[in-house]
Amino acid sequence: MGTRAAAFTAKIRNLSDYHLRLLHAVVPAPSGLDIANTLKYFSQTLLGVLREIQERPMDMLHHRDQDAMRLALFPNLDYSGLHQSLVALVDIMPLIQYGTQVFGQALLNTMACLVVFLERKVIDTLPYLVASMMTSIPDTLHHQLITTLCYYILPVTVGASAAEGEEENYAAASVPAVLMMIFQYTDNSAFHCELLECLMALKADIVKDLLCVIAYGTPTSRPPAANLLFYYWPNLNPTLYDRRGVHIKFSGWKPLVCQIEECDGDGTSEAVKVCHDHAVCLGACPDNPPPLYICIDCVEDIKREHSTVEFFDILMPMAQVSATCENKNCRSSEKNAIATCFSMECASYNGNKPIRYCTQCNNIRHNNRRGTDHVVHTTIGSPWAMDPQMQNYTIEAIV
Ligand SMILES: [Zn+2]
Ligand SMILES: [Zn+2]
Ligand SMILES: [Zn+2]
Ligand SMILES: [Zn+2]
């Protein structure tokens, strides 16, 4: 075993030791600060390992059929042992008396660093693991938790392309539980909207997950789920169509701010693009786990040095769910919006915000020749035309 691997394993033993001492109330109890320091060792070591890799593991992470290739890139460290220690720490979080803030921050950051090194079956459990931290994390970290989910975990789990012949995976199946956790433990509607819009861009049948929460969720999680359903699928309830009936006010969420420390915007410029090239990410932002989310000015700065680096647009918040078609060239006489497209190809005509279409425009933009891979949410239609599971949820939700 190399010295790095040995040190890594020794540090995992430190984490287990902290865990045991907290569990059995051995004095002096380790503080959140002690544990956070050990976690910082891991995030730095992991980013250091990543820096040595020539290939493109962050890209591979989006494709389930490239998992074997991705895992073969990394030196032999006990990544799954670290994952198990993090799971154990999530469990004992409520026992930590001091330094919970620093500890929570370090825990979320270490998870974001670790994702790319893990086996798929472990990665797929991360959405629920992170969401379940809502039960014990201080309110001040809710924002970081939602960010970790929406920008580091969900895109590479729920959003990862399926391997051939694969049935529904654990990550996709855990979405109702993730939604329920978040709706249960924060009443901040900006967080609800951010999470739901993130998932709407990744999962075509997300409405089924919302219905599942409405049907089987806890009493606290059901009202926000129902409100979101009628907000994002306004056609479901014709009497609410003009929105006068919706009594909750959605505060809207803000995009991430540029992650570059020296950004001219001084922490106010909105991130509009993402970079998956870990060498570029770590060059610009050595302490941040890739991918890197950055503003347009910083994109230009990086392009001056690395002209070939690819940047991808990111979706902006919807701000409002338009009742009428947002296609500027719409020629339909019936302009009621019935569909929302979350794919960048369509969103790029709408300031990179998801775009609402009328029936005619939806048929023109999405058919068997165009936009076949777009994630489009339409009305759910009559309960009798649904698949049995959806039918069940809908009936339960109404009752
Ligand atoms: Zn790719
Ligand atoms: Zn910037
Ligand atoms: Zn139209
Ligand atoms: Zn589209």
Image (tube, rainbow, N blue to C red):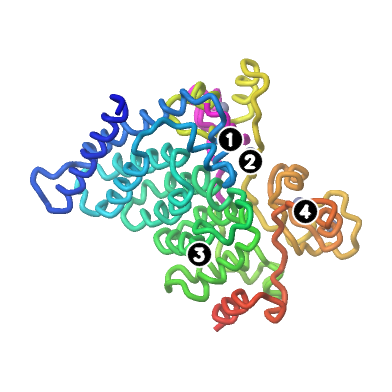
Please give the name of the residue rendered at 73% of the width and 51% of the height, measured from the top-left corner.
Answer: 373
Amino acid under label 3?
Pro
Q: Between label 2 and label 4, give the one nearer the viewer.
A: 4
Give whichever of 397, 39 is nearer the camera: 39
Upstream in the sequence, badge 3 or badge 4? 3
The span from disc 4 to disc 1 (Cα, nearest Å) is 28 Å
The residue that mark 4 highlights is 372
The residue that mark 1 highlights is 271
Q: Residue furthest bottom?
A: 399
Please give the name of the residue rendered at 56% of the width and 67% of the height, measured from the top-left corner.
Answer: 210
The span from disc 3 to disc 1 (Cα, nearest Å) is 28 Å
The span from disc 2 to disc 1 (Cα, nearest Å) is 8 Å
Query: Is 290 positioned to the left or the right of 389 in the image?
Result: left
Q: Residue furthest left?
A: 27
Contact check, label 2 and label 1, Cβ < 8 Å? yes
Upstream in the sequence, badge 4 or badge 1? 1
The span from disc 3 to disc 4 (Cα, nearest Å) is 26 Å
Q: Between label 2 and label 1, give the one nearer the viewer.
A: 2
Q: Quadrant of residue 134?
A: bottom left
Please give the name of the residue rendered at 87% of the width and 54% of the height, measured from the top-left corner.
Answer: 330
